[in-house]
Amino acid sequence: MTDRLSARAILLRLFLPFALGYFVSYLFRTVNAVIAPDLVADLNLTASDLGLLTSVYFLSFAAFQLPLGVLLDRFGSRRVEGILLLFAAAGALVFSLAESLTTLIIGRALIGFGVSACLMAAFKAFSSWLPAERLPLANGVQMVSGGMGALAATTPVQAALQITDWRGVFMGLAGIALLAAVVVFIVVPDQRNEGRQQESIAVQLRGLRSIVSSRRFWQIALWACMSQAAYLSIIGLWSGPWLRDVAGLGRDDTARMLLWIAVAMIAGYFTFGRLAERLAKQGVSTSVVASTGMGLFLVVQLLLVLFPGFGVILWLGFGFFGTAGILNYALLSQSFPQHLAGRSNTALNLLVFVGAFSAQWLIGAILGLWPTTAAGGYSPTGYRVAFLLLIGCQMLAAGWSFIVSRSHPE
């Protein structure tokens, strides 16, 4: 195989298989926003239970990120993601058969573990096959497939619930995850030197240590972590209940609104990736585009708290501007040597998903501090307090990143 794939081969053998894998990953991540009322009703879950159950995906996902980085740099994307997706399929099957919260958590944890490579494997492969200046757009296109998964988790899932129940939905997802595993393992090409184990584990671990001890890593990672933690935790679960409890939408209207948020997400991933690539040619760094986007995301969140009456419109901005944080992965790939690409991105992913787990569970715990409403929903005051806490964390991280960048310019 040549060192460079043709444009058509890149599309067919890299983008499409990884897109299918990340589609599945994001569908799993966000589907609970639609099926949450059914889970609560069938298993008598509290807000804290629901937050814990859904956020376990993030915890198991995060727990595997550091070893994942080593595995990706050592064995390559095709083998690692192809095998892990089998665990996602098994987890979906366990989830569909669960009769208790404990079994649901086990299934959800297996799913999170199984899809933990779907984004990082793609980023690793792209960094091997594409020039550095194309990475923001390539990564953005990959994220579009995740947006398609989030879109599929809205009205299509709601329509499926008219035919079957949430258990049937997860059995179907198990089949899709199995298909994705087969496609990735068979279709994706090996990267150059993949599987040759050129570095010992000790050398790889020293490479990882050099990343996490780097000032540059923390300058990028802290704000990216807080921004993406807020985005993923809310859009993956609490956006649906907010639309029900604060905006007063019914289930069908909520599913339709979640669909439009997913459309805004797709537009955001593509727009920010394309914008970063075009502006880079004019001398504007990816970090400037990422910081501007994350700053606008902060503004949208604050407006959502202050003016909930405009929430239906503001949620579109939430879906769009929240995607800016993904540019930080391309920024890391540009900031460290290519052979460290897998480890640098998974180190950031570890922080992001630990943050998302904590935020998603914390929101549920905060909502549980107020009595439920007469309609059986959660208090709007609880949402306000929880969202303000996340906004405060992002502001602190943004301020720290700004101070560091001013004192240590790129």
Image (spheres, grey):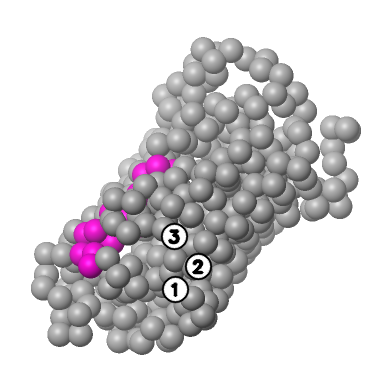
- Does the stretch in magenta take in 55? yes
Name the spot of residue 272 as percent of width and height, x first. 59, 60
- Dot 2 falls on a residue whose secondary structure is helix
Q: Which residue is mark 1?
A: 165
Which residue appears at 49% of the width and 18% of the height? 205
Ranked by sequence position, the earlier of labels 2 and 3 is 3
Q: Which residue is mark 3?
A: 96
Name the spot of residue 96 as percent of width and height, x first. 44, 60
From the viewer's side, name the closer residue of 309 and 302: 309
**In the image, residue 123 above or below residue 44:** above
Question: Mark 2–mark 1 contact, CB under 8 Å?
Answer: yes
Q: Which residue is mark 2?
A: 169
Give the main secondary structure, helix, strand or loop, of the magenta stretch. Answer: helix
Where does the magenta region start and end? 44-61
Report whether residue 130 is seen: no
**In the image, residue 136 above or below residue 151:** above
Q: CA distance from mark 1 to mark 3?
A: 10 Å
Name the spot of residue 374 as percent of width and height, x first. 15, 85
